[in-house]
Image (spheres, helix red, strand yellow):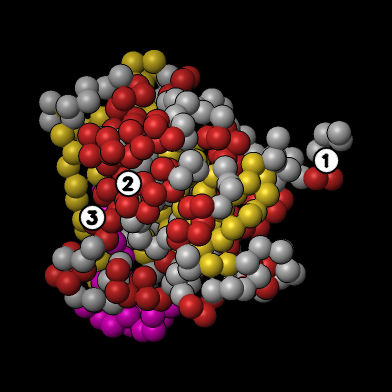
Amino acid sequence: MTYRVVQWATGGVGKSAIAAIARHPELELVGCWVHSADKDGRDVGELLGGEPMGVVTTTDAEALCELDADCVVYSPLLPDKQQVLALLRSGKNVVTPMGWFRPTDRDADLALAAREAGVTLHGTGIGPGGITDLFPLALSVMTSAVTFVRAEEFSDMRDYEAPDVLRHIMRFGATPEHARSGPMLKILGGGFIQSLRLILDGMGFDTDAEIVTTHEVAVATAGIDSPIGIIEPGTVAAQRFQWDAVIGGVSVARIAVNWLMGEENLDPPWTLGSAGERYEVAVEGSPSALMTFTGFNSGAPGETTPGIVATANHLVNSIPYVCRAEPGIETYLDLPLMTGRAHPDFATRK
């Protein structure tokens, strides 16, 4: 069966998702939403600098709701709950990296809309999603009496080619006070707290665990070259965000991100550690285990960051499973094992 797919937005994740849809043997791109007039009415392939794909972009959300499609890859810069409701009510499954990794009472209207329309909403990605919940859950199957779970990112942000995000949202190059008052803690926390709750649910920890959030910064001691220009001494050049699920005063699950503009001229003198850029997933119990992921943090100059591509691939590879799922909001705990697809050169011939 071929599933008809709409791509919502053409940022880094959206562009990579379009490429992954084109390669997937069970999917066909039939629509694409864009946010600006200069992108409206253009062939998707040409908009992305490639060959024509025969799909024309549109800024008309209602037209895409009316389009005959099975699933929407929903990846705008910021989520719009009302738009997700409209997509679900139009009879389309939705996969997204923007949230809904674990539903809460605040999502009751989305769950109801999905059930009534006979479709599914699924939140997935790399972090949140994937590294921060799916892989800890999977790794834990080989450990008993789990006492602590950790998912942590270590990245050099000098390879992150989004200067506006680095400066205005992450607030690198700002004073420590300005960085601490920024939106990043709230933006990240919304997803990572859901990841923690999913770990607690999946492993049987007390779901009344307290969530404790911390945000630390390191400042430059000398000028540091970065995608936003020189980071001046005394301004923020590294940040650490951490979320802990605490039971009886003990942390039982932790998600953390370490974002550094290199490893020189920092106060405190943070480093990425001898293992360099990576993601780590650790489970402590009998026995304990540590899994390290490399290859997602940095790519070749001018290429999309591999983590962005991985996020898009996770979304796209989930589509057939989500389209076959029970209606409602489904998490990793509800869906079967999901996999990628073989390269066409090595795929089963039919």
**Crowdedness near tag 1: few (<14), some (14–19) or many (≥20) residues, C-alpha within 10 Å:** few
- Label 3 sits on residue: 186
Amino acid type, mark 1:
Phe
Amino acid type, mark 2:
Gly
Q: Which mark is residue 191?
A: 2
- Quadrant location of the C terminus? top right
Q: Which element is circle 1 on?
A: helix
Task: Identify the residue shown where x is 26% and y is 30%.
Answer: 252
Query: Which is nearer the eye, 15 or 288?
Result: 15
- Label 1 sits on residue: 346
Amino acid type, mark 3:
Lys
Mark 2 in CB contact with mark 1 (< 8 angstroms): no
Q: Which element is circle 2 on?
A: helix
Q: Earlier in the sequence, mark 1 or mark 3?
A: 3
Residue 22 visible in the shown view: yes
Magenta-span inclusion, residue 189: no
Query: Which is nearer the eye, 283 or 272?
Result: 283
- How many numbered circles does the render carry? 3
Picture coordinates of residue 222 (x, y %)?
A: 30, 81
Q: Which residues are magenta?
A: 221-242
